[in-house]
Image (spheres, helix red, strand yellow):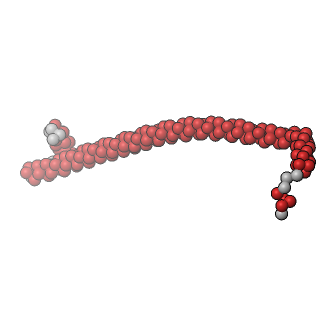
């Protein structure tokens, strides 16, 4: 066990010499691939960062466009709703005007019908009155009169009466 802890100068020199040779070989043949690998990794990281920045810019641009389209769509929707309300109010007003027009026509027709019926009733009444007057006159005079002649005479007197 003593031998393990002893330091031998010859072994130490050969160990250092072997290490330096290994280090020289490693530096000569291993540095370039190692540096190339590190550079390649650095470039991939830079590209990834640049791509992420571009993607972020595109996302921001798309978000901005989407917000603009959304606000434009909301404005258009509000305009469509406003136009719809205006059209609905116009339709309601038009329907109301049409209903008023029809109502006025019906009232005017009713008034004309009432006037016609009134005039027919007045004519009928005059005819009846003339017949009654002629009949009453016949009975009073107790003689037969010329109905046609007297009827015309009574009609002319009735026509002279006011229309009330």
**What residue occupies the far bottom of the structure in this picture?**
1
Q: Is residue 48 left or right of residue 72?
A: right
Is residue 68 visible in the rendered image? The answer is yes
Residue 137 vertical placement versus 159 (above, below): below
Quarter the N terminus occupies: bottom right
Which quarter shows the C terminus? top left
**Between 51 and 40, the one nearer to me in the picture:** 40
Q: Is 123 placed left or right of 135 in the picture?
A: right
- Tell me the residue at 40%/43% (across/down): 92
Which residue lies at the image location 56% right of the left edge and 39% below the top edge? 67
Q: 12 and 18: which one is in front?
A: 12
Q: Position of residue 111 (x, y in %)?
A: 27, 44
| Quadrant housing residue 91 | top left
Question: From this viewpoint, which residue is outermost toward the left?
Answer: 140
Q: Residue at x 83, y 61 (%)?
A: 2
Q: Quadrant of residue 90?
A: top left
């Amino acid at each position: 066990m003593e031998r393990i802890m002893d330091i031998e100068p010859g072994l130490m020199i050969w160990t250092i010499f072997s290490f330096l040779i290994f280090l020289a070989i490693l530096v000569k043949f291993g540095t370039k691939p190692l540096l190339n690998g590190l550079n390649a990794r650095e470039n991939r990281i830079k590209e990834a960062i640049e791509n992420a920045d571009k993607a972020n810019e595109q996302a921001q641009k798309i978000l901005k466009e989407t917000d603009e389209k959304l606000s434009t769509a909301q404005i258009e929707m509000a305009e469509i709703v406003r136009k719809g309300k205006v059209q609905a109010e116009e339709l309601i007003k038009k329907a109301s005007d049409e209903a008023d027009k029809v109502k006025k026509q019906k009232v005017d027709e009713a008034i004309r019908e009432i006037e016609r019926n009134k005039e027919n009733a007045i004519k009928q009444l005059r005819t009846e009155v003339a017949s009654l007057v002629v009949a009453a006159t016949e009975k009073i005079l107790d003689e037969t009169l010329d109905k046609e002649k007297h009827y015309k005479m009574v009609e002319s007197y009735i026509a002279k009466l006011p229309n009330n």
